[in-house]
Image (cartoon, grey):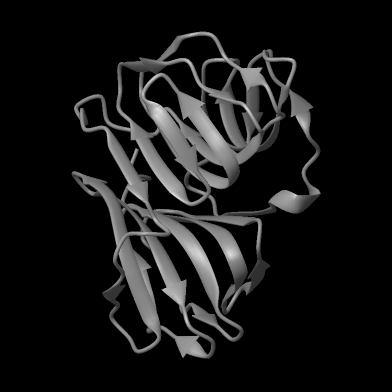
């Protein structure tokens, strides 16, 4: 892939319905991806939905600035283990692995968004880990990873949950895993990706309930 600039201006709000983005080939013949944002070629700062067909695999490769993965369905594997649906992975800067999937899987993947000083590998089985009460009734939170100003978490919204207006230092990024997430700007069904820049403000809510992956504080530079 040649150098590609897609939704790469981090100072701009961006909303993408991932269900409408075309599948594109990858270096592996059995792996396809839907590009949500990208800055670079095959080595790129990128956010994507990635689909491994049964038997797909990648050769051993290094992630110079790390990667974060949420397994949406199926099972991803590498030489360190198997990661079923709902598993969150953070592979730190400088780590390497050779991922594959025997039965197929779909992933939400972020590449080259981590600090080079963040050396912690994280594996969280979100369908088994505890939830904690959020800041308003109906909101529960599962912290996944943090480093410096950057925080990643799963957040579950019960139906008819409303949050206070607030501003995001370092920005916010959301991927809607289930249900419909909303704010004063619109409604975002399952598969939506929303990036809000540094110091942006909104008043989020969910009428029918939702499950979202949230990353905050990483859009300062």
In this rendering, the answer to whether 214 lies above or below 137 is above
Classify residue 115 as left or right of residue 202.
left
In this rendering, the answer to whether 40 lies above or below 109 is above
Question: Can the viewer see residue 31 in this picture?
Answer: yes
Would you identify the image quadrant in which residue 4 lies? top right
Q: Which quadrant holds the N terminus? A: top right
Q: Which quadrant holds the C terminus? A: top left
Q: Position of residue 15 (x, y in %)?
A: 63, 56
Residue at x 45% of width, y 11% of height: 61
Q: Nearer the viewer, residue 40 or 56?
A: 56
Q: Position of residue 162 (x, y in %)?
A: 45, 87
Would you identify the image quadrant in which residue 153 lies? bottom left
Residue at x 26% of width, y 32% of height: 121
Q: Position of residue 210 (x, y in %)?
A: 55, 73
Question: Can the viewer see residue 201 in this picture?
Answer: no
Q: Position of residue 158 (x, y in %)?
A: 48, 83
Residue at x 35% of width, y 36% of height: 90
In this rendering, the answer to whether 28 lies above or below 37 is above
């Amino acid at each position: 892939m040649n150098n590609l600039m897609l939704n790469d201006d981090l100072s701009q709000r961006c909303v993408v319905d991932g269900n409408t983005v075309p599948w594109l080939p990858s270096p592996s013949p059995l792996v396809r991806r839907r590009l949500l944002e990208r800055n670079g070629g095959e080595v790129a700062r990128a956010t994507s939905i990635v689909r491994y067909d049964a038997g797909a695999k990648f050769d051993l490769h290094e992630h110079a600035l790390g990667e974060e993965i949420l397994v949406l369905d199926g099972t991803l594997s590498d030489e360190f283990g198997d990661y079923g649906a709902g598993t969150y992975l953070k592979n730190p800067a400088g780590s390497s692995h050779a991922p594959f999937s025997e039965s197929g899987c779909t992933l939400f993947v972020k590449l080259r968004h981590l600090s080079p000083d963040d050396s912690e590998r994280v594996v969280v089985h979100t369908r088994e880990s505890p939830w904690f009460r959020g800041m308003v009734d109906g909101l529960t939170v599962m912290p996944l990873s943090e480093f410096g100003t950057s925080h990643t978490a799963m957040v579950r919204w019960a139906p008819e949950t409303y949050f206070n207006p607030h501003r995001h230092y370092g920005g916010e990024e959301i991927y809607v895993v289930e249900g419909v997430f909303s704010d004063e700007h619109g409604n975002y069904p399952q598969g939506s990706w929303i990036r809000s820049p540094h110091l942006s403000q909104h008043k989020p809510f969910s009428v029918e309930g939702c499950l979202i992956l949230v990353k905050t504080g990483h859009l300062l530079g």
